[in-house]
Amino acid sequence: MALSKIGTNSISDSAIATAKIADNAIVTGKITDGTIATADIADDAVTAAKVTGLGKIGQVAYGSTTSNVLIESSGGTSSFADTGLTVNITPSATSSKVNIFITLMGVQTANGTNARIDFKLMRDSTELVNYQANMWQQSSNEPFRNGGFGITHQDSPNSTSQITYKLQFRAVDGDCNVQRDSNSGSSAITVMEVLA
C-alpha cells in the first residue's frame, strides 16, 4: 500500500524531535520575519561585529590628577615633561577610532615678558598633535593663570594592543605650571573607543 501524504495539520506539536532534523534542513529563506522572538535569542548570540550603524561606543577609560607640575625656563625653551595626565586603553578592533577629551586645570605662566606654554598629545611614543604658543603672556612679568584648558582629538591607532595616551607640556621664555595648587581642581583625560 502506497504511503499517503501527511498534512501539516496531522503533525502534533513536539512530534518531531530536534535530533531528527538535519543540520541543513532549515534554511534562512524558510524563516519568516517575526518568527524568532527576542526571548529565544541568547544574550551572547549577537556580537558587536554584527551590529552596524549605531555609532557604538566600545569602551571608556578615564584618568585624572591634581599634582602640581612646574617647569622653569626663563629665557629659553624647556624639554617636554608629563602633565600627569595619562590613560590606557586596548581597542577591540583595528578599525576603531579613539576620541580623546582633555581638561587641564590650573595652567599658569610667569616670570617672562613673552612666556608661553606648548602642549603635545602622545600615543605611546608617537606625537599626535603639537599645540604651540598657548597661554601666551606678553609684555608682563606678572603671573597669568587660566582656570582651564580643553583639548579634543580623534585618533585612528589601527591596533588591538594596549595604548597609552598622555599629555605633555613645555615652557618657553618663562615658568609654567599645570595643576598649580589645591584651588585648581582636578585635571582629567577621557578616551572612548568608537567602533566602526
Image (spheres, rainbow, N blue to C red):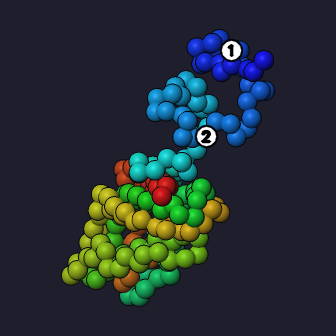
Answer yes or no: is residue 45 visible. yes
Q: Is residue 97 above or below residue 37?
A: below
Q: Is residue 35 above or below residue 89?
A: above
- Residue sitting nearer the eye, 32 or 117: 32
Marks 2 and 1, how far apart at CA: 20 Å
Q: Is residue 182 above or below residue 97?
A: above
Task: Indicate the position of residue 97 as horizontal and vertical percent values.
Answer: 48, 62
Residue depicted at x 37% and y 63%: 152
47 to the left or right of 133: right
How many C-alpha atoms fall within 10 Å of the one at disc 2: few (<14), some, or many (≥20)? few
Q: Secondary structure at mark 2?
A: loop
Q: Secondary structure at mark 1?
A: loop
Task: Indicate the position of residue 23 as horizontal and vertical percent values.
Answer: 73, 38
160 to the left or right of 177: right
- Quadrant placement of the N terminus: top right
- Residue sitting nearer the eye, 3 or 146: 3
- Residue sitting nearer the eye, 55 or 53: 53
What label sits on residue 14 in the rendered view? 1
Kind of residue indicated by mark 2: Val
What label sits on residue 167 in the rendered view? none
Label 2: which residue? 27
